[in-house]
Amino acid sequence: LEPLNIRTSFLTKRSTGKYQKAQMGIRIHCVGKDRPGMLAAVAEKVSQGHLSVENITTELKMDQSGSRNFVINCDCTATHKMTKEELDRLFEDFNVLKNELSFD
C-alpha cells in the first residue's frame, strides 16, 4: 500500500464497561441495481430496529445483462432476544425497503 500512499491501522473497541452483551445475531443481505442512498437506507432500518452493526461489506457486481448490482452484507446484533413479533416487524420493515429500492 506504500506506493499508493495509503495508511492502515487496526481498530480496537473501547472498554468502558457500559456495553450490553449481544444476545442474538442477524445477517441482512441485499442486492439491487446500483443507485445512491442504498447503504444509507439499510443503515437507517438497522438503527430503527435497535440493532448494532458488527460488520458490513459492500460490493458492486455485474449481472449477465451488464447492469451493476450493489450488494450489501450486514451482520448485526441485538442486546436482547427478539420475540417472534419483533422479528416479524423487522422482516416486514425490510420487505417495505426491498420494494422501495427494488432489491432482488
Image: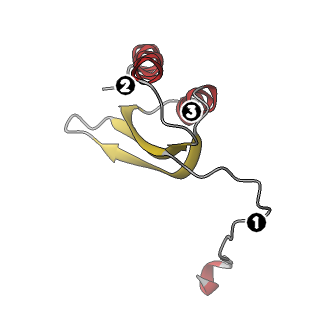
Horizontal placement of 91 versus 13: left or right? Answer: left
Which numbered dot is residue 14? 1
The answer for how far apart the CA atoms under marks 3 and 2 are is: 16 Å
Q: Nearer the viewer, mark 1 or mark 2?
A: 1
Which kind of residue does numbered mark 3 sit on? Val
| Residue 72 visible in this rendered orientation of the protein | no
The answer for how far apart the CA atoms under marks 3 and 1 are is: 22 Å
Give the percent coordinates (x, y) of residue 25. 44, 45
Which numbered dot is residue 103? 2
Q: Residue furthest left?
A: 64
Give the percent coordinates (x, y) of residue 12. 68, 71
**Residue at screen point 46% across, 16% down:** 89
Please name whichever residue, 78 or 70, is drawn nearer the observer in this view of the structure: 78
Give the percent coordinates (x, y) of residue 78. 54, 40
User: Which residue was labeled with disc 3?
Assistant: 46
Image quadrant where one finds the N terminus: bottom right
Which kind of residue does numbered mark 1 sit on? Arg
